[in-house]
Image (cartoon, rainbow, N blue to C red):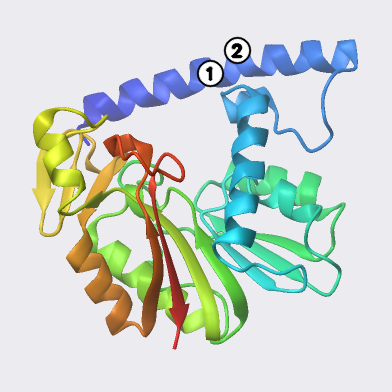
Amino acid sequence: MSSSRRLAEAARFRARLAAGTALDLLDVIAGRGDPLAPPRRLLGDDYSEFERIGNEFLGHFVKLGGLEPHHRVLDIGCGLGRMAVPLTRYLTTAGSYEGFDVARLEIDWCRRTIGSRHPNFQFRVLDVRNERYNPGGSAQPTAWPFAGATFDFAFAASVFTHLRPDDASAYIAEAARVLRPGGTLFATFFLLDEETRPRIERGDSHFSFRAATDGPAAAQDAGSFEAAVAYDLGWVRDRLGSAGLDVTDLRHGYWSAADDHLTWQDVIVARRR
């Protein structure tokens, strides 16, 4: 990303923060708000959409991924806890949740608001460098602070859609390492394959991913590659297989105008051998 674009995005972030802070103050004065609703200065969107997507994905985790209430869960790129909030109502005290993200402000809020109410929910900052979301990060993507074979279920919702190939490969390898044998990875992607490519060529899809390429990855925006990244399905299958993860389900999303879509992005479910 160019320095001018980075400065422009920083200015937009500061403006959103200021406007959201004012709205948060009005909510406090009026006594409005769910105690687990993120503040508007951080969320930037309508809470009803935040809540709807979280509840939707909990249903996918259970029905498609086989998530059970006693499972040990890892949220890869947890953000403001969009998936954590509904999981507080689903996981029992026999289960547990670990979430990490590169965004320190968001992790701090999750710790204060979710973690303080639910002791089996833990949140960590992972200072991994990402050109768009954490350009000052210092850690390598392999630096996940978890022992091997720790989790029953790991998910990455809208994470691989913001990673370059080396980082995506490292995240897949780490996800496989921390899953127990038989554990499940539930991950969303923008996938390029024999179904999505013809729809892109016809102009039916929401994205074209023609702006730039990096090996098996294609970007929607050449100036900010990691804003939206699509991957060749064959490459993803190869990386998963090499890490010891077998694909058990694949559902296309409606970003590409798929008739049988499950959600916005494509979904892959894979199990650890």
Q: Is residue 16 left or right of residue 8?
A: right
Is label 2 in a helix, a strand or a loop?
helix
> Can you say whether 266 is above or below 24 in the image?
below
Cα distance between the residues tagged 2 and 1: 5 Å
Image quadrant in which you'd find residue 270: bottom left
Looking at the rendered image, the quarter that the N terminus falls into is top left
Is label 1 in a helix, a strand or a loop?
helix
Q: Residue at x 40, y 26 (%)?
A: 10
Residue 16 tag number = 1
- Name the foreground residue: 270 vs 165: 270
Contact? badges 2 and 1 (CB < 8 Å): yes
Residue 218 tag number = none
On the image, the x and y values in percent for residue 214 come to 12, 54
On the image, the x and y values in percent for residue 116 come to 85, 53
Image quadrant in which you'd find residue 187: bottom left
> Can you say whether 177 is above or below 198 in the image?
below
Q: Is residue 271 something that shows in the picture?
A: yes
Q: Is residue 80 something that shows in the picture?
A: no
On the image, the x and y values in percent for residue 166 come to 24, 65
Q: Is residue 77 left or right of residue 124?
A: left
Looking at the rendered image, the quarter that the C terminus falls into is bottom left
Residue marked by disc 2: 19
- Name the foreground residue: 59 vs 177: 59
- Name the foreground residue: 34 vs 116: 34
Q: Amino acid at mark 1?
A: Arg
